[in-house]
Amino acid sequence: LVNRLPEANLILLRHLFGVLHHIEQNSGVNQMNAFNLALCIAPNMLWLPSPTGPEEESRSTKKVALLVQFLIENSGEIFGGDIASLF
């Protein structure tokens, strides 16, 4: 699925998740593991197209957070093992 994205989107995601993965690698010092990072960034990445009730928004945010957490934890496999070389 990632390989089907436009190149500009893929580059942006590689860099974003490269940074998030780097932060997560230092979670022993900064307390920002993949779960905490996902909770912080998920509401800003994807949202429902139209206003809904608080329950639906909460369910949607949780789903997006799980996706973001997965992408952070598996960024090397998803975006290429050389993701650290972006820095």
Image (spheres, helix red, strand yellow):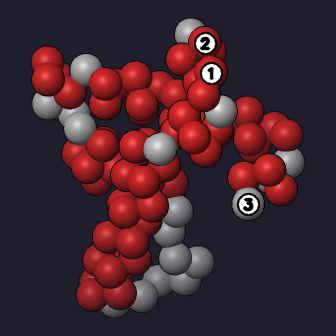
Mark 3 crowd level (few <14, some 14–19, many ≥20, 10 Å Cα)? few
Residue 1, numbered label: 3
Residue 9 position, x and y percent, is: 75, 43
* Label 3–label 1 contact, CB within 8 A: no
Quadrant of the drawing holding the N terminus:
bottom right
Give whichever of discs 3 and 1 has the lower sequence position.
Answer: 3
Using residue 76 as the reference point, say whether residue 29 is left or right of it: left
SS of the residue under disc 1:
helix
Label 3 and label 1: CA atoms lie apart by 19 Å
Residue at the spot 51% in from the left edge and 54% down from the top edge? 45
In the image, residue 71 sits, relative to residue 66, either above or below, namely: above
Q: Which residue is drawn at 22% across and 33% down?
A: 32
Question: How far is disc 2 from disc 3 in space, using C-alphas?
Answer: 23 Å
Which kind of residue does numbered mark 1 sit on?
Asp
Q: What element carries label 3?
A: loop
Is residue 5 shown left or right of residue 77? right
Mark 2 / mark 3, whichever is N-terminal: 3
Residue at position x 42%, y 32% from top? Answer: 20
